[in-house]
Amino acid sequence: MPFSFFAAMYPTQYFRSIDSTNIKAKEIAEQGAISGSAVVAEYQTNGRGRLGKEWHSVKGKGLYCSIVVRPKIALEDYPKITLVAGLSVAMVLDRIIARNSQLKWPNDIYFRGRKVSGILTESSSLSSSSQDRYAVVGIGVNVHHLETDFPPELREMVTSLFLETGNKFVVEEIFQAVRQELLQQLQLFSTDGFQPLLCQWRKKDFLLGKEMECVSSAGKKIRGIGLGPDDQGQLHVRDTNGHIHEVLSGDVRLATS
Ligand code: BTN
């Protein structure tokens, strides 16, 4: 059973265990939940990642939350929410552990080349009217994970706030800070546009200038140098022939050899 209360004026539902906070947040968004409403869980039985992947949730060790947002931006700007969300989480984590994270397009957060947080943004259907429109920003942060909490095949690629610092954190405080930052940055998006946010995002670009592999918007596997996101938030990659490809979504990784 969830218990809910208005934290900092925003309705929040807390669960010990849930299938996925994104599923629940979409449910409440469809019922009209206000911007800033959130679902937080200590554990997810069916945590979901991007591209149909699983998000491994370790009981009580991470932040698993989904925040309903209804920014006053044009429909065609909705895909950019995902970059703004990554930037917002990165800013909070940097403040908390006094380090400089990096962002791997579209929205993974890295410390020392290892993933500490991932974001899955899901939007209302394209046919929703502007007043019903929403996005659910699902955020997973590895907070108190030890190396052995991760599946062996991931251990080299991931980290947690605890592994980075040796410190313990109050997960609820991280959640509140993330929600506040996300709503604030989305407010700036609606008043000042995407450019200032993109500028900050680019300073943290993990793939910029690096050799990487991905699937282009035309469905072609490409290898090339990361050029960073363009004004629409789409990643550009220059292949060995000098051709520039636009990546809309898909798996993006550093080239292995
Ligand atoms: C990714 O890295 O592929 C995105 C991971 C997103 C995980 C979070 S955890 C809270 C929320 N609920 C989910 O089912 N997924 C997101």
Image (cartoon, rainbow, N blue to C red):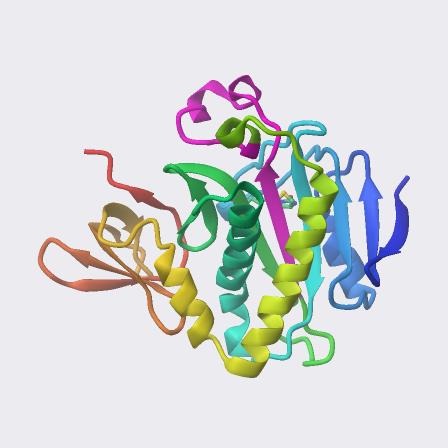
58 vs 91, nearest the viewer: 91
**Residue 170 x %, y %:** 71, 37
Q: Quadrant of the C terminus?
A: top left
Q: Please tell me which residue is depicted at 62% across the width and 60% down the height of the picture.
A: 181
Residue 85's quadrant in the figure?
bottom right
Q: Quadrant of the N terminus?
A: top right
Is residue 16 positioned above or below 123 on the image?
above
Q: Could you tell whether 237 is left or right of 159 in the image?
A: left
The answer to whether residue 14 of the structure is visible from this angle is yes
**Residue 44 x %, y %:** 70, 35
- Residue at the left extreme? 241
**Residue 95 x %, y %:** 55, 49
Q: Could you tell whether 178 is left or right of 249 in the image?
A: right
Is residue 94 positioned above or below 183 on the image?
above
49 vs 41, nearest the viewer: 41
Q: Please tell me which residue is depicted at 68% across the width and 60% down the height of the picture.
A: 180
Is residue 9 positioned above or below 116 on the image?
below
Residue 186's quadrant in the figure?
bottom right
**Residue 121 x %, y %:** 58, 57
Residue 9's quadrant in the figure?
bottom right
Q: Please tell me which residue is depicted at 50% across the width and 79% down the height of the picture.
A: 193
112 vs 37, nearest the viewer: 112
- Residue at the front extreme? 98
153 vs 178, nearest the viewer: 178
Taking the image in four quarters, ligand 1 sits in the one at top right
Residues shaded magenta: 135-161
Magenta span has 199?
Answer: no
